[in-house]
């Protein structure tokens, strides 16, 4: 499975982080409207991430619910026909919760910077430093730490749970 180092923070405002991301040279990619449908699973988490149109991704991941940066393992499957998948999934999976968000995506090196406005939950900042086979783990950790410092995140409160757990509360 693919791996990344990830951490999520609560924030009142996304503007300062967006300004700092621009300042350090992070590359703005897009503003994405996403709907994540989480399914009940015996282990890990499974969600269908829907984008406008009929495209989506099925994402399975395992990650501890703990404060601070943590290792996540994941698999992504592109779904070309969301409507058909939803018909099939409704017969075999139990839906737990649906989370809607608007995400601004920035890239810095191997790190995805997510600035999320999550319906009913608030604003969040998420870093996902993808572990690449040709990059030493220590270099990935250094990039992750650099972004924590450069984006002023070390003073913010971490959100140790996924949007799934937060929405279920």
Image (tube, rainbow, N blue to C red):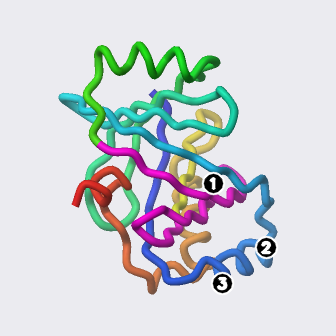
Please identify, in this view, whether the residue under mark 3 or under mark 2 is nearer the observer: 3
Asked if disc 3 and disc 2 are in contact, CB closer than 8 Å, the reply is: no
**Residue 167's spot in the image, x, y percent?**
31, 57
Q: Are marks 2 and 1 in contact (CB under 8 Å)?
A: no
Residue stretch in magenta: 97-125
SS type, badge 2? helix
Q: In this view, does 119 lie above or below 3?
A: below
Secondary structure category for the residue under label 3: helix
Magenta part mainly helix, strand or loop? strand
Left or right: 126, with 30 as reference point: left
Percent across and percent down for residue 158 are 37, 72
Which quadrant is the C terminus positioned in? Answer: bottom left
Q: Residue 75 placed where, x, y %?
A: 47, 28
Residue that mark 1 sits on: 111
Residue found at x 43% / y 74%:
10
> What is the spatial separation of the Cα atoms under label 2 and label 1, in whole angstroms?
14 Å
Q: Residue 16 carries which label?
A: 3
- The magenta stretch spans residue 72: no
Closer to the chain start, of discs 1 and 3, is 3
Image quarter of residue 41: top left
Q: Name the residue under label 2.
A: 22
């Amino acid at each position: 499975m693919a791996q990344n180092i990830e951490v999520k923070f609560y924030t009142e405002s996304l503007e300062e982080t967006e300004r700092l991301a621009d300042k350090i040279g992070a590359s703005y990619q897009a503003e994405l409207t996403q709907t994540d449908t989480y399914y009940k699973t015996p282990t890990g988490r499974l969600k269908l991430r829907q984008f406008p149109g009929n495209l989506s991704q099925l994402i399975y991941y395992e990650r501890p619910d703990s404060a601070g940066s943590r290792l996540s393992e994941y698999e992504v499957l592109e779904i070309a026909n969301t409507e058909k998948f939803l018909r099939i999934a409704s017969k075999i999976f139990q839906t737990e919760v649906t989370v809607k968000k608007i995400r601004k995506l920035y890239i810095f090196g191997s790190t995805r910077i997510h600035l999320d406005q999550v319906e009913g939950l608030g604003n969040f900042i998420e870093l996902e430093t993808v572990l690449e086979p040709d990059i030493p783990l220590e270099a990935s950790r250094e990039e992750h730490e650099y972004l924590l410092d450069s984006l002023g995140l070390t003073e913010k409160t971490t959100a140790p749970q996924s949007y799934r757990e937060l929405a279920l509360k």
